[in-house]
Image (cartoon, coloured by chain):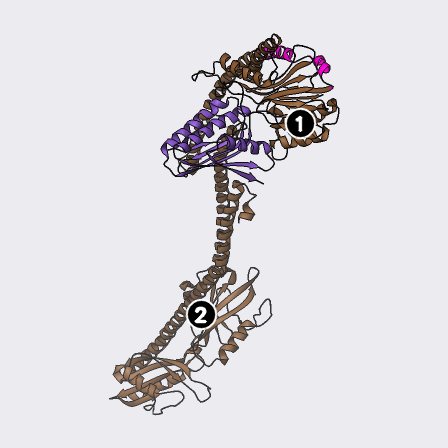
Chain colours: A brown, B purple
Amino acid sequence: MNIFSAGLSIRNKIFLLFGLMITIIAITIFMILPQIKETIIDNSKKEMVTTTKLASVMTESLFDNSIRNYLRGVSESHRNTVEYYYKKYKDGSMSEEEALQHVEALLLSHRLGKTGYMVVEAIDNEKLTFAVHPKAKGMDVTKVGVAQQVAKKQDGYIEYEWKNKEDTSTRFKIVAISSFKEWQMVVGATLYKDELYSLMDKKEFRKSLHNANLSEEKSSIFTVFDINGEVIYHPTLHDSNLMMLQDEKTGRYFTKELIEKIKLSESDETSGWMEYSFSSHGIQEKIMRYIYLPKYQWIVASVINKDEVLRTYNTLKVKLAIAIVIMLVIIILLAVIAANYLNKRIGHLIQATQMLSNNEYDFTLIKRANDEIGSLETSFDNAREKIKVLIHKQEDLTANLEVKVQERTTELQKTKQEIEEAHKHIKDSIEYASLIQSALIPDHNKFQQYFKDYFAIWQPKDMVGGDIYLFEELRDDNECLLMVIDCTGHGVPGAFVTMLVKAIERQIVADIKHSDDVVSPAEILRIFNVSMKNLLKQEDVNSISNAGFDGQVVYFNKKEKIIKCASARNEIFYYQDDGLQVIKGDRHSIGYKDSDANYEFTEHTIDTSKETTLYIATDGFWDQNGGEKGLPYGKKRLKKMLENIHNESMEKQEAEFLAAFEAYRDGSDVNDDVTVIGIKI
Amino acid sequence: MEDLQIKATKYTPEIDFNATNRVLEIKGKSYPENTFEYYKPINAWVQEYFASVDDEETLVNLDLEYLNSSSSKAYFDFFELLDLAREEGKSVVVKWIYDEENDIAEETGEDFIDDFEGLNIELVVKS
């Protein structure tokens, strides 16, 4: 059903449903029709049986009455004749014997029809004293049963069966008797019943049958005919013989056939059906119901047109057809109305839905009826109202939001501008600061005066940094001081500390220049330590500042071919022909709160009469994260590199340092400021 | 006492101090901008912790790939707290964990051993 109806509109579904209903009703009716037909035929046939039976009874009774009236008339008129002769005897004009002879002669001479006759019996004390009978003249009929009955009954009728010697079977006889008391006589008129018909008044009989009006249906007729086919009664055919009537279609002699059938039948009570076609207003199929009356050897029959029987059925069929057509029209009308109604109702909903999907919310879906669709309309309208409210809220919010976003954007832009301005300001400041810091970086021309070759890598992590290196010529052209300083942190705070370091360094250098004392890098570190702590007030436990530096101080005396050096924390690497030497820095930083102001740094001396290559660097180089594991570059890796490159030119070595640094870092952030100085002596 | 747990950042290590198990773990790199400020609450926790523990052993696992100079100083302070606790009779075991390729960390560990001779510091090499 779903597969069939899936593509159908509701209208068509309703039509389909109603159509199915009509079909089912029609099929039901047409299935019942044959049974109705059968019932109607059965009823008609039963009616015919009854009608025919009634007709036969009526015919019989009418005929019996006719016989009796006729015979009684005859017997009474003869009795009057007997009385006439009795009066003759009594008035003396005749003797009794003469009178009786006249009676006998007269009555014997009288015949009734073919074989009927008159009889007289005189009875005295139940003894037959006189008898007149044409066949047994003067015979003693006391032994004959009928004679006994006649003698006893005196007046009225006696019916009996009689078989003459020449007959093959017994026949029905009737005798009407009238008594004549004076002679104690009974005068009778007797007759075979089947012979009476020729004697009786046929017109009168037919009239009485006709008046009985046994045919109810228009096409039905009632007829009586005898065993020879002679018509006794027929509404249209008189004095005809039916024997030669033929079936219009098959040509059979249906009356003859019927009579032969009856003759062959052993039962006296014979009745039955016969069908034939006969022409009366065109060829008609006929149904005949017949009853055989053996007393008269008559056949009483009702005949009806088959059409007549089926007329009720056909009428019913036509009426049913009309009813179905009317029903069909009404149902189609109802279906159309129902479909239109539903379509209209659903149409409103569909329209409403489309409006919703087109973002139209300002309408009202009216509840049109108190049914399911009505509930749907109500709930739809509620939903619409809620959506409308939500949408309005949403719109308000959006509008609000847009205003807010605009406000915020403006604010943000303002802030951004401010920040950008501030940033530019700071950047400009720091850029200028970096110029100042760069001014601290020594003039490399001076390096050339003291060292065979050199390189200097100075890369602050940011624009300014906490790393710095210093170079100072001292009291003559032979003495110089080289320092690599890694101040606390990097960036601006680191840079501040470098300025401080520079200031202290200037003081120290000035002091050296004004004295003849032997220059001691360890002492220089000690002075840095004390000065830093003093200047940053880091002797005070409550001081919040905690700054300082790690670094190497190298003093070179060209004339004496000697290097003296000291280090806070960071290594001093140098190469001479016996290989790489590492001077570990003292594990003591300069200037910090917990740095010991009295700390004495270790001083190392290197003989530079042999070629010496010396490297000092800040931890920014070996602490740089990188490699596969993101670990610091490490001092082992540094030493290994130095082994490989120490014989190269310083320019080449600088390039190797930078390349190794970048390769190891491989894009990772630079951790710290990086300073590496290499000198060749 | 409540545990101290601080997730690692780009500049600071993961801190997982469990007072119940008496296991203090630090793992990662340390080079914050304001090192001393950063380690102040951590060191404060350690002080409070040692004030609360009895003589049961405390295990300190330090797996520090990189310390910048100021962080080194902050950890020096941290070791001083441990040493102080030890001196007060608490049992402290330090495991200095480092990668076999990380000679900087190894050296730092060795330096701490030199600086705090009384402390039980064990070098543990990761491979």
Residue B65 visible? yes
Chain under callout 1: A
Report which residue position mark 1 lands on.
A661
> Label 2: which residue?
A202
Callout 2 secondary element: helix
Nearer-the-camera pick, A597 or A394: A597
Between A178 and A457, the one lying in front of the other is A457
- Identified by mark 2, the residue type is Lys
Residue B113: x, y in percent?
51, 33
Q: What is the quadrant of the N terminus of chain B in the image?
A: top left
Location of residue A77 by image quarter: bottom left
At a point 61% along the width and 7% down the height, the residue shown is A514
Between residue A107 and residue A379, name the one nearer to us.
A379
Please, is residue A74 above or below residue A318 in the view? below
Residue A68, image x, y percentages:
36, 75
**Which is more N-terminal, label 1 or label 2?**
2
The chain under label 2 reads A
The mark found on residue A560 in the picture is none
**Which residues fall within the magenta stretch?**
A429-452
